[in-house]
Image: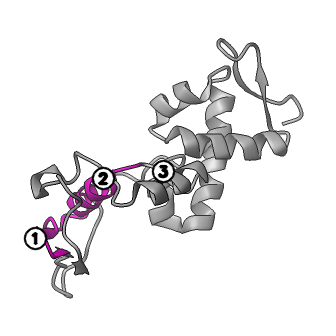
Amino acid sequence: MNPGGLVSGLKLKDLGRVSRPRNLLLFSLMARMDLVEQIGSGIKRIRSAFRDYGLEPPLIEADADWFSITFRRKPQDQAIERKRQKPVAVSPSHAVRDEGVTEGVSEGVTGLLEFIRNKPGQRTPQISKATGIPIKTLERWVKKLRVEGKIEFRGSPKTGGYWQTTDE
């Protein structure tokens, strides 16, 4: 439970569909520092994770003075099992959930290199569309791979794309 209701103009039914920052200045600063990804997707991802694990959806309540989310768990004698296959390694939200932050980023970078190896010549917007990874996250991973000399950009900024370097 947290003090303070929903952001002005936001209704409970909007959660998971509409995103409004409480503090626009702080949000803008964090976005410029690349500390924000998958903007406005938290409630939607929570609901999806609960559905994937076969759990009841969280109970979300709010009024003008408070906001709360109640997570109901299964009884201790019932196991929580996944309902779908293990996610693709390049998906940042799943990699972080499954292996932890460090391994998730490392797996994501490795998965991106594999994607570029299999589908060379694509730019970050195309890769983002194909993988569902936010462009800001891809840009960080691409920078890491470029610094390590594992990929290079070939062609013009409008028509070129990323290729694995020949030393790999």
C-alpha distance separating marks 1 and 3: 28 Å
Residue on which disc 3 sits: 37
* Nearer the observer, 157 or 62: 62
Q: Residue furthest bottom?
A: 76
Q: Amino acid at mark 1?
A: Asp
| Whole-percent x, y for residue 128 in the image | 51, 33
Say which label, 1 or 3, has the lower sequence index. Answer: 3
* Horizontal side, residue 147 vs residue 54: left or right: right
Q: Are marks 3 and 2 in contact (CB under 8 Å)?
A: no
User: Which element is circle 2 on?
Assistant: loop
Say which label, 1 or 2, has the lower sequence index. Answer: 1
Q: Quadrant of residue 113?
A: top right
Q: Quadrant of residue 117?
A: top right
Residue on which disc 2 sits: 84
Q: Amino acid at mark 3?
A: Glu
C-alpha distance separating marks 3 and 2: 24 Å
Say if 17 sits above or below 118 in the image: below
The region drawn magenta spans 39-67
Residue on which disc 1 sits: 63
Between disc 3 and disc 2, the foreground one is 3
